[in-house]
Amino acid sequence: MNKIIAFLIVLSLSLTYRLSSQTIYSNNNVEVTNLTDKTYLLRETIYFTANIVALTGPDGILLLDTGFKHASADLVDAVKYLKSGKVKFIINSHPHGDHIGANSSFGKDVRIIGHKDCEDSFSGDGLKAITFKKEHSFTFNNEEINCIALPGGHSPCDIIIHLPTSKIAYLGDMYLSESFPLIAIGSGARAQTLFKNLKHTLSVLPEDTRLISGHGKVTTMEDLKNYIEMVETTIGIVRKEMTAGKSLEEIQKADVLKNWSEWGKFFEFITKDSWIEDIFLSYTEN
C-alpha cells in the first residue's frame, strides 16, 4: 500500500508540473515557465542552463539566485514581464558567479539574503545583506520562506530555500538534478559533507515537495532519493579503490564509474573523472 501511495504522489506531482510548466515568455537568454500561480522558473541559457526562481505577489518580487552577470539585462526584462513590482529580496543559495551575477541589477534597495560566512560576496556593489549562520525565516507575499544553511557540500556557504505553501524547494548547486556533483575542494567543500547534507535535506522536506536545482530539470523527492543513492554508491566505489592503495590516476583509468556514465553528460566540465577526483581529494586533502 505504501508503494501505491508513493506512486500516486509522484504521478500527481508529475501531472501538476506538466500542466503548469508552459513557457509564458522568452528572450535571448531567459525562458520563463510557471511553477505555481505565483512562482516562476526563469531558466537562463547564456552559457549553460542556470535556474532562477521568482516569487510574486502584492509585496513585490523575491528572487532565488540571479544567474550570470552577462545575462542580467535579459533577466531584468523577464522579471518585468511578471508585472509584480520591484524586486525586494534576493536569496543567494551560494556565492558562485553563475548564481549572484545579476544581484546588482535590481537597484540599491534590494536586500540580499545569504550565509554569513560569504557576506562579502553578497554585499558587493553597495548592496545590503541579511546574513545568517543556521536558519532564517520570514513571510513575503503571504508565503513562509525558510532558509536552511547546509554548508560544505558544493561550496562553503550552501543554503536551501523552502516555500512550504507553494510546495517547492530551491537547492542551488548542492543538488545537480542531471549531473554528478561538483565540489569546491579549494574552498573546503567535501563529497562526504555533500552526502550528509543531501540526506538531511531529504529528512526535512515533505514528500510532495518539488525540487529546483541550480542547473537541470525540476524533480521530485523520489528523484532526490535516487540521486542520494547514486552519490553514496559512487563514493563507496571510489573509496574501496582508495583503500586498496590505488592512485587517483589508476582509479580514473580503471573507469570504475562506467555504469553511471549518464550522470557525466549534462555538463562538459563535470564528468566521471571529475567526480572521481572530487571524491578522492575529499578524503585526502587537509
Image (cartoon, rainbow, N blue to C red):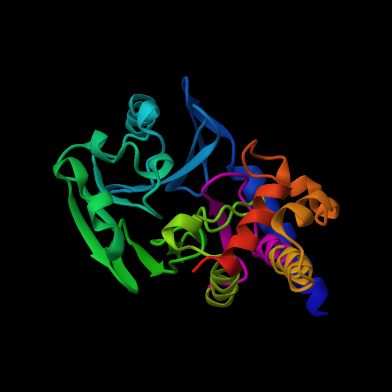
| Quadrant assignment, res 86 | top left
Q: Which residue is rendered at x = 34% and y = 73% of the image?
A: 135
Task: Give the farthest residue toward the top.
Answer: 28
In this view, the residue in front, 174 or 58, is 174
Q: Position of residue 39 (x, y in %)?
A: 44, 48
Residue 79 falls in which quadrant of the image?
top left
Position of residue 280 relative to residue 54, above or below, is below
The correct choice, above or below, for 253 with respect to 27 in the image is below
Q: Nearer the viewer, residue 88 or 72?
A: 72
Q: Residue at position x 70%, y 66% from top?
A: 235
- Taking depth in this image into account, of 250 and 134 the one nearest to the observer is 250
Q: In the figure, 194 relative to 63: above or below?
A: below
Q: Give the side of residue 212 with respect to residue 145, left or right.
A: right
209 inside magenta stretch: yes
Does residue 28 appear anywhere in the picture? yes
**Percent coordinates x, y for residue 100 in the rendering:** 35, 43
In the rendered view, tell whether residue 58 sits above or below residue 169: above
119 sits left or right of 12 in the view: left
Residue ID at (73%, 52%): 249
Q: Nearer the viewer, residue 52 or 128?
A: 128
Query: Can see residue 178?
Result: no
Quarter of image, res 160: bottom left
* Numbered-mark total: 0
Magenta span includes 87:
no
Residue 73 horizontal/vertical position (percent): 33, 25
- Magenta residues span 205-230
Q: Could you say where residue 1 lies in the image, as x and y percent from the top left?
A: 83, 80
